[in-house]
Image (cartoon, grey):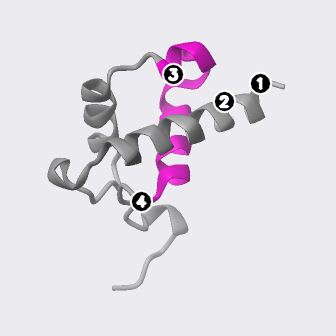
Amino acid sequence: MPFKDIEDLPIDWKDHEDVAMALYERFGEEFGEGKIYRIRFTELIEWVLEIPNFAGTRENCSEGHLEQIQAKWVYEWRDNNK
């Protein structure tokens, strides 16, 4: 199946940076560094599963993936708020 655009590619739990970029696009400056690290993992899982091209499942999620997503989200926030 050919992909018309790179954004059509499915992403999964291991694609931490892609997930973080999608979360930053959704929430923008609403979530600063401190607020990102205080997000409950139960909420974060739901937000990730709502990403349009996200192909992962709740069962394949791990605490390590969520921690990496939070860290990458903070880096994305910092890059856009210099």
Q: Range of the magenta residues?
A: 15-37
Q: Nearer the viewer, mark 2 or mark 3?
A: 3
Within-10-Å neighbours for mark 4: few <14, some 14–19, many 20+: some
Q: Residue at x 45, y 16 (%)?
A: 38
Q: Which residue is mark 2?
A: 77
Q: Position of residue 65 (x, y in %)?
A: 39, 48
- The Cα–Cα distance between marks 4 and 3, rounded to whole angstroms, is 19 Å
Q: Which residue is mark 1?
A: 81
* Image position of 50 with respect to 57: above or below: above
Asked if the residues shown at circle 1 and circle 2 are in contact, with their CB atoms under 8 angstroms apart, the answer is yes
Q: Which residue is mark 4?
A: 14
Sequence order check: which comes first, mark 2 or mark 4? 4
Three-letter code, disc 4: Lys
Sequence order check: which comes first, mark 4 or mark 3? 4
Three-letter code, disc 3: Ile
| 50, 59: nearer the viewer | 59
Q: Which residue is mark 3?
A: 36
Q: Circle 2 — which element?
A: helix
- The Cα–Cα distance between marks 2 and 3, rounded to whole angstroms, is 9 Å
- Determine which quarter of the picture holds residue 78: top right
